Amino acid sequence: MFSTVLIANRGEIACRAIRTLKRLGVKSVAVYSDADRNARHVKEADVAIALGGDKAADSYLRIDKILAAASESGAEAIWPGYGFLSESLPFAAACEAAGIAFVGPTAQQIGEFGLKHRARELAAEAGVPMTPGTPLLNALEEAIDAAARIGYPVMLKSTAGGGGIGLTRCADEEALRNAWESVRRLGEQFFSDAGVFLERCIDRARHVEVQIFGDGSGKVIALGERDCSLQRRNQKVVEETPAPHLPQATRDALLASAVRLGERVSYRSAGTVEYIYDAEQDAFYFLEVNTRLQVEHPVTECVTGLDLVECMLQVAAGDDLDWARLQRPPVGASIEVRIYAEDPLKNFQPAPGTLTGVVFPDEVRVDSWIDTGTEVSAFYDPMVAKLIVHAETREAALAKMQQALDATQLHGIATNLDYLRQVVATEAFRSGQVWTRFLDGFTPSASVIEVLQPGTFSTIQDFPGRLGYWDIGVPPSGPMDDFAFRLANRIVGNHESAAGLEFTLQGPTLRFHSDAVIALTGASCPAALDGVSLPYWQPVEVKAGQTLTIGRAQSGCRTYLAVRNGFDVPEYLGSRSTFSLGQFGGHAGRTLRVADMLPISQPRLVACTTPAPVSEPQALDQALVPHYGSEWRIGVLYGPHGAPDFFTQAAIDEFFS
């Protein structure tokens, strides 16, 4: 085994590799960009070397910088993880030329399987079933002729594509004509290769892949299959093993074909052979080979008991593999979900920012790089964590995953956590009847309120607020007019500790993405729901899609909005109230901003820390409604800042006059 290994990656996969290296007693070397200087993998590694720059092109994709870091640290090997340079032929070749072991397949294998048309040729030679398709195409007219022979719909693919980039379904000739230049351009832009080819498109197809492992000398084994059919824009969302409803004879043929392909090239290290599975015809077809560890490899590790990172290191070091252990059949079922910092309500656009609350359950495997306070950068892939469960049966694993998702808390930025809860709960997934385009027609509900305009100094507060910390420099936090705030919660039936909104002089404009019951109290501001005037001091039903607009205070200063169940924000020093000067509490530790998504508490979830409502919504007795006049009498105390260091005697006299 090596004594020192450099990890040419970041995020949860880098943290995962560091744990394995520590267990093996191998010195770990992390590299990092400027944006990742405080990242977990930097803190956990034995040695951390700065690459400089924020973008991947200036850091994790710089072969020269990574090789220089390996030389500086004395690393004998480089482990590439996935993404970045993990499937780079020039990088693997450069490692070999520098006398540093590349912990993965050979450069030749990466090069051949990296070109999809060449991968199809190798698969055909190994007798792997192929979908009708073409070699590389030179012209649009050639593609049109080929598509007519194959039959529509067809998939137009970039030969060097990956991650769903350069992949377009064409239902007819017009669609093919429209996609031709776009797919070629994407291939050139992302992979420096404009080559394209066609394959028949199988609608309602499933995506099934086989994990293979080889010693580089001709011995290859299959470690079971994974179903990765739940995808969004060709990116996997949920993965599991074994694949549900896959006949045993089909499974055996699938694994055998993957092994034949690996043996055909004397495959070295971990790799994945991906297939399209036509459930109606019970037929599978070759898709591609990924010459690296997959994001979803933990489900295979759960059912096999293997550490695939360790296996990769052993092969790269020339150590003997425990083939008896590798050949043990998988046990049980495992499911993984990918958690992204992205906003499902905004077409899943990335949502960088600071995580103000992170809680994962203890009883499941969590591969992650985040903690409370982690800054999620806009420079990299937005995946922040993976939850992985393992149980004796798929039904038990499903129940365990639902419980794990319900117990997970992520605050401060938008994530797909609630989206995953709903996906896993669908009948189609629970019955194992999903396909690669299933999520295209899935519309999740969203218990959030979107901030279109924030108003003036609008914050989340709770009662009694944050008390008892003056001695450490934290003044009391909470609603200024706590009487009106508490009445708002009472009107909607909330527990008195539920968090609500406070506005100062000018109210916000809010869009509701779910049905809700609200109450407005405090200083009177004109309020309208889709243009219809709203009353204060009584419950109001709001429908999903409606917009609430609150104007300027006509009397008084602070206005309050309570929503039934309260706002789902984490407690900090015993309170959910915002202390904006200290940058903690409330939503992201600050006043509201345009495009903020304010989650409404869901008491049914284990992760919810807000008590459930205690009564039904009801209007307030008019006798309890406070009166806010326009004339105020202010009491003044002479404090320490009246000293001459701050004010002259003449100024003090003027103030009191």
Image: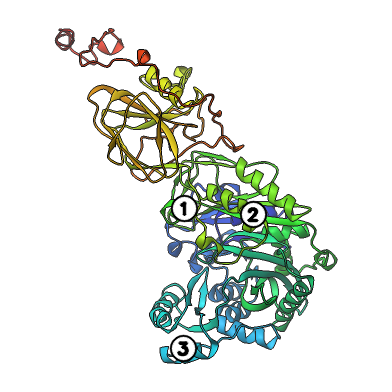
- Residue type beneath disc 2: Arg
Q: Which residue is mark 1?
A: 344
Q: Which residue is mark 3?
A: 143
User: Can residue 545 be spotted in the picture?
Assistant: yes
- Residue type beneath disc 1: Pro
**Residue 96 falls left or right of residue 506:** right
Q: Which residue is mark 2?
A: 16
Q: Nearer the viewer, mark 1 or mark 2?
A: 1
**Residue 574 falls left or right of residue 524:** right
Q: Tell me, yes or no, whether the two marked residues, 1 and 3, touch with CB atoms within 8 Å.
A: no
- Residue type beneath disc 3: Ala
Q: Is residue 498 above or below residue 308?
A: above
**Residue 505 falls left or right of residue 583:** left
Residues packed near mark 1 inside 10 Å, few (<14), some (14 to 19) or many (20 plus):
many
- Give the position of the N terminus as an image quadrant: bottom right
Instruction: Using the image as rendered, state which of residue 623 and residue 509 is in the foreground.
Output: 623
Label located before the other in sequence (1 or 2): 2
